Amino acid sequence: MLNDLDPILHSQLRLSIISLLVSLEEAEFVYLKEKTKATAGNLSLQLDKLREAGYIEIIKTFKKNYPLTKCKITPKGIKAFEKYVNDIKGYLHL
């Protein structure tokens, strides 16, 4: 039996964000924007969805008087990503 895929992670951009954060644990907004090639608005929207799901934490600070947004994966986000990867493997081994 195939498991349903997590609808939060089944978005290409959200999956890209989580994939980056799994290996980095934390990344700045600008870095994620550059790596995913997303617009700032779309990236912000998708980060909010991941935050609302409890998969990431968003930390807003300042660096030399400029706003700095960092994103950090949560233990729940790591668990969700691992499950998603295993569920995909299930689809590949039909």
Image (cartoon, rainbow, N blue to C red):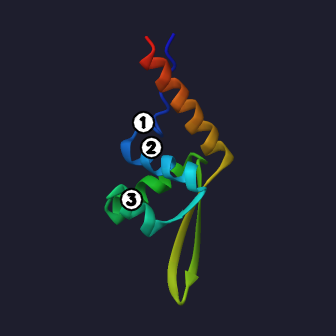
SS at circle 2: helix
Residues under labels 3 and 2: Cα distance? 12 Å
Q: Is residue 76 above or below residue 92?
A: below
Q: Residues within 10 Å of mark 2 (few under 14, many from 20)?
A: some
SS at circle 3: helix
Residues under labels 1 and 3: Cα distance? 18 Å
Say which label, 1 or 3, has the lower sequence index.
Answer: 1
Nearest the eye: 42 or 86: 86
Q: Which mark is residue 15?
A: 2
Give the residue pinned by disc 3.
Answer: 35
Among the 4 quarters of the image, the one containing residue 80: top right
**Residue 62 pos. (x, y %):** 56, 82
Among the 4 quarters of the image, the one containing residue 39: bottom left
**Residue 56 pos. (x, y %):** 58, 53
Looking at the rendered structure, the kind of residue marked 1 is His
Give the residue pinned by disc 1.
Answer: 10
Say which label, 3 or 2, has the lower sequence index.
Answer: 2
Nearest the eye: 48 or 29: 29
- Classify the position of the C terminus by image quarter: top left
The residue located at (38%, 59%) in the rendering is 35
**Residue 67 pos. (x, y %):** 50, 80
The residue located at (65%, 43%) in the rendering is 76
